[in-house]
Image: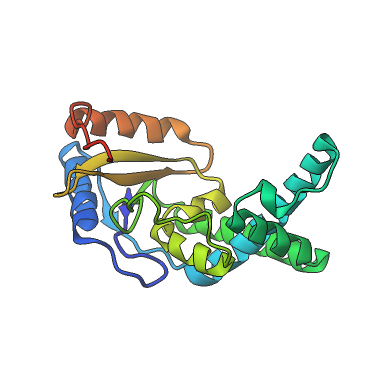
Amino acid sequence: MGFTVTPPNGTAVDPEVKATVLATVAALERLGHDVEEHDMPLDANAVWKTYTNMTCVQTAATFGYHETVIGRPVTPSDVEPVTWAIIERGRATSGTRHISDVEQLRQIGRDVVGDLAPYDLFITPTLTQLPRPLGYYDMSEPDIDRYNAKWTDAVFAFPFNISGQPAISLPLGWSAGGVPIGVQLVGRYGDEASVLAVSAQLEREMPWKDRRPKVSG
């Protein structure tokens, strides 16, 4: 197995998040797994920009289909400001730009799969930071770039949307403030079975079923 606590975009990891991943690695070693540290050689900031540009076009196309269903154009009053900004960017993107983004992401996905091929499972934080308070991801934000920048917390998650590898987030840690801390397990392409088998081991070794976060007021 491999693991990392180093984000591929150069940002910091919350100490409680890092400690949870390292505790998970220690638990896996107690269970008899060999685990080594491996940092992903991914230019995540550049890839994130390509990925979000591609998804803008997909969103615009989806709402274009919705227009045929409801029989009228979609307007800003139908959606949140950030969703409208996504639609507008998608509509303004040329076909050649979009296919270039898609091809880049295909290559990046293959690179990610190849980089992690030596490991039957790869362990990362789910998020680089503790869960954000309600309202942090503000759908009333009209600036799509400012909105997307907040999602750097998920820098360990989105590469596997691109690569297509199976992944799961397990609430293996608990912060001092009483919120769960996720650890992500990523499997080889098509190997959901290993992800689920090791998840079951960790659930027994680091159980969370009796933890209850405070209900938000």
| Relative to 104, residue 77 above or below | above
**Image quarter for residue 93?**
bottom right
Q: Which residue is drawn at 24% across and 51% down?
A: 21
| Relative to 48, residue 23 above or below | above
Residue 174, percent from left and from top: 19, 43
Residue 55, percent from left and from top: 65, 55
Display coloring: rainbow
Q: Can residue 107 be seen at all in this image of the molecule? A: no
Residue 62, percent from left and from top: 74, 45
Q: Can residue 113 be seen at all in this image of the molecule? A: yes
**Image quarter for residue 52?**
bottom right
> In the rendered view, does 12 fall on the left or right side of 165?
left
- Total of numbered circles in the picture? 0
Name the one closer to the observer, 216 or 154: 216
The quarter of the image holding the C terminus is: top left
Residue 81, percent from left and from top: 60, 57
Name the one closer to the observer, 12 or 206: 12
Q: Residue at x 69, y 54 (%)?
A: 76
